[in-house]
Image: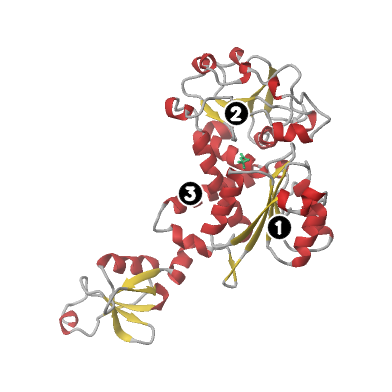
Amino acid sequence: MRPNLYRGRHPINADAFGPVEFSEVFRTADDMREKYLDRKIRPLLKYFLLRDGEPLSFQLIMSPSTRTAISFQTSIRVMGGIYDWKPDIMSSLSKGESAKSMATILGYFECCDCIIVRYDEDDYAAQKMADAIEDRGLSPIVIDAGSGTRSHVTQMFLDMYTYYRWRPKEFYTGDITYAFIGDLSHSRTIHSDLKGLENFGGTVYLVGPEAENVPSEYLPSSENTRLRIYKVTDPLAIADKVDAWYFTRSQDNLRKKKKTTGDRKSSAFSEAYWATKKLRDAMKKDAIVLHPLPHGPEFEEDIDLIDHRFQHFPQALNGIFVRMALLKMLFAPHVDIKQIASEYGKVEMSGYFHSIPVNTKNIIGLCCTENCLCVELRGNGWEGKLQSKQEKLKVKAENPIIPWTFCNHTHCQQVSVK
Ligand code: CP
């Protein structure tokens, strides 16, 4: 049986997820996107990562990262959790401590609910941490945020989500032609994305120099795969067929650490594997061009401003929604924003000197006269007056079962209720 987010507990392996889990991630990410982008709703997300009213705690152990680290930090902060960020060079990992030993300590200290790990030195860093936790019956969940050249599970989810949002029908039916270009040997995002795409199918061109290729362990076995995979050395030869390009830089940080495979010189990637004007002119006009970032000379800075096909910044933004979705699915599967709104939503009441915020859950009655702003507060009788009609609508929307009665004003009591 395929382990999934729930059965396997730890999202650490790119090949652990099937189409059902992907669909759930996409649906939840769409939902989180909508809520995050709505400035009025966003504050309510801070009630997601709570247990018994206390914030859940996350430990980020990270080799260098911009997008993954910041999108996790942002997601955790917006959703009400707390985090500590420990760069790997500031921990004893830099003195040779193993990932297992570190995870064991975090588990024994009971200092966090979740370990998010990016570790360039070890292809199995997240897996080893999860093993250490499970072997000792400890509690934190481990999330892979990039392990060596092998896996980058959350990048895989955000890349699949980007393809899905771009062409949902074709993505699900396997009618997209992809080109993965650049560091085929060492790019953990390519290796993980191939595992993800196996669920949906499609045609894949692996584009790189003769000596470069995706190691066989990351390629699907020839039987039963929905992917048609071809290795090519010349991107111009396939440019008119490709719908979705995925450029990568030479992974010099990982090449230095991995001494046994491939060509270790970044010069392996000549202009032949860059998005030169010649290649851009040959690409389909409605293609999409992605890159996990950071980019090197594969394309020029600000190319997105002159060529709308380059969607690497919106792709990175999807990382926030996908990571929020994963946190929601793992830690708050049953939390409902409507429930939160009725429990924690605040409205402004008129005060003597200034307005006073009041939880909507403390409002137990509304005056049924349309223009009257009086509300009944728990234990106070007809004491409160809302600031505006807008606030009254908010109370009604967030708690539709609040009874409508007349307030004590004579003129209100004279109005008949329809
Ligand atoms: N795509 C990605 O993993 O970027 P960072 O290395 O900046 O996290």
Residue 164 screen position, x and y as percent: 54, 37
Horizontal side, residue 404 vs residue 333: left or right: left
Disc on res. 306: none
Q: Quadrant of the C terminus?
A: bottom left
Residue at x 76%, y 33% (from the top left corner):
256
* Amino acid at dot 1: Ile
Name the residue beneath numbered marker 1.
141
In the image, which is nearer the foreground, mark 3 or mark 2?
2
* Amino acid at dot 3: Arg
Q: Looking at the image, is mark 3 or mark 1 earlier in the sequence?
A: 3
* Amino acid at dot 2: Gly
Name the residue beneath numbered marker 3.
33
Q: Give the Cα distance between marks 3 and 1.
A: 24 Å
Residue 341 against residue 350 in the figure, above or below: above
Name the residue beneath numbered marker 2.
296
Q: Looking at the image, is mark 3 or mark 2 earlier in the sequence?
A: 3
Any atom of ligand 1 within 8 Å of the CB at mark 1?
A: no
Q: Give the Cα distance between marks 2 and 1.
A: 34 Å
Residue 371 screen position, x and y as percent: 20, 71
> Callout 1: helix, strand or loop?
strand
Horizontal side, residue 27 vs residue 330: left or right: left
Residue at x 41%, y 53% (from the top left corner):
38
Residue 306 against residue 388 in the figure, above or below: above
- Front residue of 130/286: it is 130
- Front residue of 213/414: it is 213
Residue at x 79%, y 34% (from the top left corner):
258
Q: Looking at the image, is mark 2 or mark 1 earlier in the sequence?
A: 1
Q: Is residue 1 visible?
A: no
Residue 4 screen position, x and y as percent: 70, 50
